Image (cartoon, grey):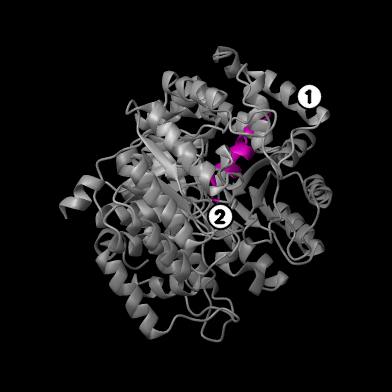
């Protein structure tokens, strides 16, 4: 599944025509779903009206070809609720929401948050568990089970602990209660998650190498582990390349793939010409320039 | 080069990590230890690693720790490889334990980051370099950030260590960190063919997908069949089939995690293999925790097929 970056003009305002091209690119190159705006899409550097405007564009451009989910996590929980209602109103297929930022909420507070969110809309809700970015705040297996028992539209999780034990804790709690509960992960970590019941991943590098992403998914789903290891290694090198100043380097790399999407909003830096050249040399070394689509 | 080639031949496979039995007065119970070693050998161990943290290594004074390794190697008598755990706070103390392990006849040594100091990477590198250089047998690095107050080993450090140590044979990973394992197995085997990743506990499906070929098994004293089944399925890359046993093992791991070694020993007693209580500062389980553990063990279906008694 692809989560597009947010294209910006040189004055840092939203670049709608390029966003439309990017959405169409992802749909044409094998994305199984679109989700926007993830942190990679600079969600927290966008205003709420901006997020609504591009959410509408995403639903309109994708036009039912694949599902569109809207990431509604915001610093203020009230904004999250507003974005969730908006996503439902514009016809999105679901929403994705992380545990609340900043406050290090207790398990009871996290539970109350998801209960409120899920009962405020009818759309399917995917939760987003990312303890390493949120001071250890996490949805435990027990809490996951309570939420599933209580909320019919609590349908999955983006599990971003990237840790064998955490993934198992959640899969063991969730799947017996809801066998089609969607266990998803991030950064294309398909190799370690699919054998444990994972059904997919959001992608970090999909705007650079959609073919590689699809190949890795196919290798994992079909249990071709030697092939999957080779592809996961290659993706890992790309992650190391882009993780640094994410998503600035990613946007820099997109310039080199003929798909420029403009600068990155502060406090994130914008990839310099030198950084872009370095990214290009790495993409060349990894064979990405030859094996992946160039231009739109 | 020939040295490094020969070093990479030892493949530990499924490594049982026995507890250390104590008598009522807290002395090492060597009769029981001999019985326990026999149990592990008869129930699926490819190798033994001792005394790991599950064997209360940190609660054994230096002399006892050496005597334990000597006893184990003598008792095993070549039937299986013995990996000596030589982690220590001071680098020189750990290196001395390493030299002792070689003299005692251990097949390999394993060591984690220094206790207490939470050192930066340069210090960790130096620590491992000195331990590895002190021994002439394969050296395995034990990466366990949760146990070690967050001190982590990254793939870059491991690559540096490969360059420094011809006997650096692999990483026993208890970080369970996907990115670390993927990076390690992407780069380390290119630098040193035969370099191994071993799962540091019985969570092997993801590690096995990434390329782990071995596993350390502290739960083998409780459920050796289940542990062996999981290991074999992962080793044979039947990873979808391994998920069922993996979930059972994860339930067992979660049940004993609460009280640590005290729970591990209590669960072994429940299985008819009493190895006494842990040494201070660890406390034996209180009655309520013990009862809860018994209930949780009872709910794990796979345990019904496991051997009872010795």
In-front residue for pair A32/B128: B128
Screen quadrant of the C terminus of chain A = bottom left
- Against A246, is B284 above or below? above
Q: How many marks?
A: 2
Q: Which residue is more in the foreground, B64 or A115?
A: B64
Chain of the residue that carries numbered disc 2 in the rendered image: B
Q: Which mark is residue B291?
A: 1
In the rendering, at what x and y percent does residue A254 appear? 40, 71
Residue carrying label 2: B145
The segment highlighted magenta reads: A162-182
Q: What is the crowding at mark 2: few (fewer than 14 residues within 10 Å), some, or many (at least 20)?
A: some
- Who's the residue at 74% across and 34% down the image? B284
Which residue is at the front of the view, A27 or B306?
B306
Q: Marks 1 and 2, Cα distance to the nearest angstrom? A: 31 Å
Residue B141 lies, in percent from the top left, at 42, 52
Question: For residue A210: magenta?
Answer: no
């Amino acid at each position: 599944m692809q989560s597009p970056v947010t294209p910006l003009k040189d004055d840092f305002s939203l670049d709608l025509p390029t966003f439309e091209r990017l959405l169409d690119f992802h749909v044409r190159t094998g994305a199984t779903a679109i989700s926007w705006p993830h942190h990679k899409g600079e969600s927290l550097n966008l205003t709420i009206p901006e997020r609504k405007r591009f959410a509408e564009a995403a639903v309109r451009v994708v036009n039912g070809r694949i599902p569109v989910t809207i990431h509604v996590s915001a610093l203020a929980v009230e904004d999250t609720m507003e974005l969730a209602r908006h996503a439902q109103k514009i016809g999105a297929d679901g929403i994705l929401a992380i545990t609340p930022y900043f406050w290090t909420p207790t398990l009871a507070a996290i539970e109350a948050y998801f209960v409120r969110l899920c009962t405020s809309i009818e759309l399917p809700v995917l939760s987003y568990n990312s303890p390493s970015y949120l001071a250890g705040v996490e949805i435990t297996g027990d809490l996951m089970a309570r939420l599933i028992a209580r909320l019919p539209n609590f349908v999955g999780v983006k599990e971003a602990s990237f840790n064998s034990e955490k993934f198992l804790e959640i899969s063991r709690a969730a799947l017996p209660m809801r066998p089609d509960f969607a266990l998803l992960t991030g950064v294309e970590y398909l190799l370690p998650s699919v054998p444990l019941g994972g059904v997919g991943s959001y992608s970090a590098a999909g705007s650079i190498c959609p073919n590689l992403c699809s190949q890795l998914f196919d290798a994992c789903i079909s249990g071709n582990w030697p092939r999957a290891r080779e592809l996961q290694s290659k993706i890992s090198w790309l992650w190391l390349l882009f993780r640094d100043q994410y998503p600035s380097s990613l946007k820099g790399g997109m310039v080199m793939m003929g798909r420029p999407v403009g600068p990155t909003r502060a406090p994130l830096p914008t990839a310099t010409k030198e950084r872009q050249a370095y990214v290009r040399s790495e993409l060349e070394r990894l064979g990405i320039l030859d094996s992946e689509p160039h231009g739109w | 080069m020939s040295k490094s080639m020969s070093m990479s031949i030892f493949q530990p496979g499924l490594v049982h990590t026995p507890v250390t039995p104590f008598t009522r007065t807290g002395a090492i119970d060597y009769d029981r230890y001999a019985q326990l070693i026999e149990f592990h050998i008869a129930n699926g161990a490819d190798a033994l690693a001792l005394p790991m943290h599950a064997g209360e290594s940190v609660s054994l004074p230096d002399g006892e720790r050496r005597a334990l390794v000597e006893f184990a190697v003598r008792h095993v008598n070549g039937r299986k490889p013995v990996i000596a755990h030589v982690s220590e706070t001071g680098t020189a103390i750990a290196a001395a334990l390493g030299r002792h392990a070689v003299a005692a006849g251990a097949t390999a040594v394993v060591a984690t980051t220094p206790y207490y100091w939470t050192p930066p990477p340069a210090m960790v590198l130096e620590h491992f370099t000195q331990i590895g250089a002190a021994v002439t047998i394969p050296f395995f690095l034990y990466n366990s950030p949760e146990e070690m107050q967050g001190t982590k080993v990254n793939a870059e450090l491991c690559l540096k260590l490969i360059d420094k140590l011809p006997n650096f044979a692999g990483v026993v990973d208890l970080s369970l960190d996907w990115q670390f394992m993927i990076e390690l197995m992407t780069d380390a085997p290119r630098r040193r063919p035969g370099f191994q990743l071993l799962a540091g506990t019985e969570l092997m499906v993801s590690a096995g997908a990434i390329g782990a070929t071995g596993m350390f098994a502290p739960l083998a004293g409780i459920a050796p069949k289940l542990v062996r089944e999981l290991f074999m399925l992962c080793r044979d890359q039947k990873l979808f089939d391994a998920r069922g046993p993996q979930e059972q093992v994860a339930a067992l791991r979660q049940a004993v995690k609460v009280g640590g070694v005290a729970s591990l020993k209590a669960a072994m007693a429940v299985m008819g293999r009493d190895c006494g209580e842990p040494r201070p500062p660890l406390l034996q389980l209180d009655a309520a925790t013990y009862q809860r553990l018994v209930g949780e063990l009872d709910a794990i279906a796979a345990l019904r097929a496991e051997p009872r008694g010795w």
